[in-house]
Each structure stands twice: as structure tokens, then as C-alpha cells.
Amino acid sequence: MNPTKPAAQASGEEAVRSGRDTLSIVDNRTGKKYEVLITDGTIRAMDLRQIKVGEADFGLMNYDPAFTNTALCRSRITYIDGDAGILRYRGYPIEELAERSTYLETAYLILHGELPVRAQLEEWTYHVTHHTFIHESIKKFLEGFHYDAHPMGMMISTIAALSTFYPDAKHIFDAESRRKQTWRLIGKMPTLAAFAYRHSLGMPYAYPHHDLSYTGNFLNMLFKTTELKYRPNATLERALDVLFILHADHEQNCSANAMRNVGSSHVDPYSAAAAATAALYGPLHGGANEQVLRMLMEIGSIERVPEYIQRVKAGERKLMGFGHRIYKNYDPRARIIKRRAEEVFEVMGRNPLLDIALECERIALEDEYFVKRRLYPNVDFYTGLIYQSMGFPVTMFPVLFAIPRMAGWIAQWEEMLLDPEQKIARPRQIYLGPDQRAYIPIEQRG
Ligand code: ACO
């Protein structure tokens, strides 16, 4: 390559010669023309840096608050076509996985790239199941929380605390260590969640049972009382398993980005996962399912739905569980959940809030405000109704999202770590603050 030429310009010219895709940019400030390579429908932001008005110029940057049009990575994990309403893990449609797979098998697929053969699944299930116990000292952390502490706050803290119990986790470039932390994180999430729940009720903790399924054991740790052996209801166990499959990954969402971003500093996976859990807690992300239920309770009756929709259109409120950065069509997960809800209601009785939700959806799907903005129900719109019917308090809803998302977070983190193009994530800024000024002693300040 000619060293006097900027890399992008040189690669652009090469590309033009070889007939590859390029973008021509004319800088109207200088009249200079640049050729930038287009690969996979993207240009490299660093290729813009050569565009300068003079030697002292830093070079052109792209400004993209909230990353609405920036690809952060090349990924092979999850594919979403938001316009068509398509979601696939490692190429497998979410509908097929929800119908035929289990959460642990799907988690294996997301993490390893392929569906396991029987022996691999047995080994994987064995290891995850045998890492469900938590150190007794973790219980002391939980005991420090108020009875009304939000369980997501307890989750964030206890996930972060795990890093202090497993110092080997800092060996992030050791595949064996990563494998072990993966078993631990996926295995312990239901235990931490169930213990946080029982803490808020003041109930004694119920320990994991190794001969139950992942979700069966979770229900056991949540709801076991005096029975010698807890037997989960098969419909509820399967419904929860399907919900876990649907929540296992969703490419570069806010919490996955937090996992990658924090993980890019090469911190241990527990600390990065605590950050991802914190990101999920927010009401615009995993906290939305909790907000949906609160909204439905606030609306209170079908008759009051039109009035609420008017308030949404006036900008006073949001219709929680509607809209998505990527899906501009019905969220495929919401469609599956709506069907599963009926099965849960058959066992637990119909949730009276369902009719309010259905009326919100009916009005919104016909209303110009929502149609024009392409706002459809997202995954959170119906999950809360199922969770409530299963006996979960609303504060547990985001926790039920965090448990299965651990598989996706770890897969995203590992992909980031092993990607030679990735470095510590560090965006740029456009500085708009004051220019240099002299310090003024306090007596002289006006
Ligand atoms: N209710 C009413 N109006 C909405 C809603 C909503 N739920 N969502 C978006 N809009 C409006 C916005 O006000 C905006 O209108 P404008 O163009 O007149 O200003 C327009 O639709 C575009 O919305 P943005 O906020 O620009 O969309 P963005 O992609 O930034 O936000 C988000 C996506 C955060 C999910 C948003 O739709 C929202 O807040 N929804 C409610 C919260 C929710 O359900 N979150 C869960 C998302 S799924 C998940 O994380 C698992």
C-alpha cells in the first residue's frame, strides 16, 4: 500500500479497480473526493477520519447518539429482521425453538453455535444443574437488604458479588475458565432470583433440586413450602421454559451492549453481567414488563382504555409494551407469548387484565398515531400477564427476563473477547463546553 495515501482512500481505489462496492464522498469544504469501501452494507467510521480541511484537523467523525445507525460488531449469534418480524438464534427460527426446544438446549445453541447431540446436551445439563448452589455467604448479602428491596437490585448486587467468590473468573482468555463461569452464571441465576424472592417474603430459602428441569427447579426454589418433594405443574413449567427461550438473546440491545462494553475492559464476566443486569432493569428495556402491568392496573377497566390512549397520543404517557427500536412489525415473541398465555390461564384462571390489554392492542393497531409510527406490541406486552397469573409479583418480572438472558449476554461477551477487531469500547464526543479559562478564587466569583 502506498504509505502516503490514507488507508481508506487506497483501499477505496483498489476496490474501484476490482469492481467492488464503494462510496464516493465529495467534501464540499475542500472539493476533495474520497472513495470508501462498502462491506456488508457498511462503511468503516475510521475511513472517514482521512477527510480533513487541513493538516491540524482531527478528521471527520460520525455522530450517532444512541447508536441508531452504527454496527458495533460482526456477530454470528442472533438475526433480527425488524421489518419482517423475524428472529433467529444461530439461524433457527424462534417459532421452531419455542415449539420444539428447551431453554437449556437453546442456551447451548446460542453459546456454542450448534444444537447439541444427545451426549453434549446431557453433559451441559449436568454441569449447569450442578452449579446451581450458591455460597452460603451470598445469603448474608441478601439478608442485608430490606424486605421491600427490589429483586433486580438484589440480583445486580449478588451477581457482582459472585466475582469475589470465583477469582479464577478473571482469566477471561482461558477457555476452560470461561466454560466454568458460564455453567456457574447460568446455573446460579435462578437460585439468586428465587432467594431474592423468598427474602422479600421472609420465607426460608428452598435449595436447588438436581433431578428437576431448569425451570422446574426454579419453580421449586420459588414456591416450595412443606412438601417433601416439590412437583411443578407441567404446563407452567413448560410455559416458563418457552418464555425463557424467547428471552435468551436479542443481538445488540441495551443490556448486551452493556455486557460487551463493560467486558471490553477485560473485567471478569460476573462484573460485566452485573452491568448488563443493571441495563436490563431500566423501564425502557427489561423493566417494561413491570411497567405494562402497572399501566394495565392504572387503566383499570376496558371502558377507560380510549381515555388512556388519548393521553398517550397527547404525549402524557407511553403505551408500555409497545414500540421497539428494531421491530417495526409485530414482535414475533409477542405472538408466541399471546398463545402461551391461554394455556397458563387454563391452569391458573383468566387474568382479568387480559381484556384491558387486548382492548389496548385492538385500538392501537387501528389508530393512526400507532400505525404511522409502526408501534406494535413487543415481547413485554403479554409476558407480565402470564407472570402475574403464575403468582409472581410485578417486581419479579424483570428478574424473569434477566435469568434466561444470561445465555445471550455470555455469548455476546465471548464473541467480543475473541474478535480480533475489538478493543476497549471508547466512543468519541463533540465537545461543546467552554474553552480554556483561568481558575477564579472563591472570593472573586460574582
Ligand atoms: N407509546 C407511545 N408512543 C411511542 C411509544 C410508546 N410505547 N414508543 C414510541 N413512541 C413514539 C415516540 O414518542 C416517537 O414519536 P414522535 O416521532 O412523535 O416523537 C416515535 O414513536 C418513535 O419513538 P422513539 O422513542 O424514537 O423510538 P425508539 O426506537 O427510540 O424507542 C422504545 C424504542 C424505547 C422501545 C420505545 O418504543 C418505548 O419507550 N416503548 C415503551 C417501553 C417498552 O415497551 N420497552 C420495551 C422494549 S422491548 C425490550 O427491551 C425487551
Image (cartoon, helix red, strand yellow):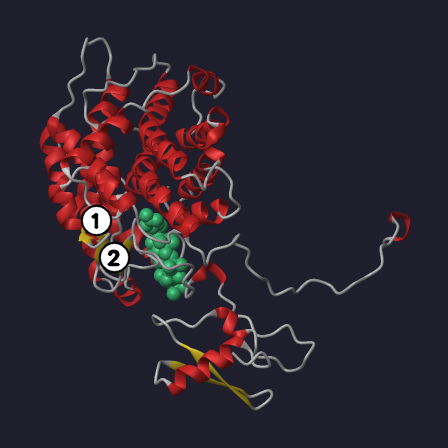
Q: Identify the element where label 2 is drawn.
A: loop
Instruction: Name the image quarter holding residue 440.
Output: bottom right
In front: label 1 or label 2: 1
Structural crowding at the residue carrying mark 2, measured as other residues with C-alpha within 10 Å and reported as few (<14), some (14–19) or many (≥20): many
Label 2 C-beta lies within 8 Å of the nearest ligand 1 atom? no
Q: Identify the element where label 1 is drawn.
A: helix
Label 1 C-beta lies within 8 Å of the nearest ligand 1 atom? no
Instruction: Name the image quarter holding residue 38.
Output: bottom left
Question: Where in the figure is residue 190, as x and y percent of width and height?
Answer: 31, 28
Q: Are marks 1 and 2 in contact (CB under 8 Å)?
A: yes
| Residue type, mark 2 in image | Tyr
For the point 21% across and 44% down, the residue is: 356
Question: Where in the figure is residue 364, as x and y percent of width and height?
Answer: 24, 57
Which label's residue is closer to the chain start, 1 or 2? Answer: 1
Residue 434, placed above or below residue 96: below
For the point 35% across and 27% down, the residue is: 188
For the point 34% across and 56% down, the residue is: 75
Residue furthest out toward the right: 443
Report the residue marked by disc 2.
Answer: 376
For the residue pair 333 and 81, the one nearer the viewer reads as: 81
Residue 227, placed above or below residue 67: above
Report the residue marked by disc 1.
Answer: 334
For the point 11% across and 27% down, the residue is: 234
Question: Where in the figure is residue 33, as x and y percent of width and height?
Answer: 52, 88
Residue 129 as seen in the image, left or right of residue 429? left
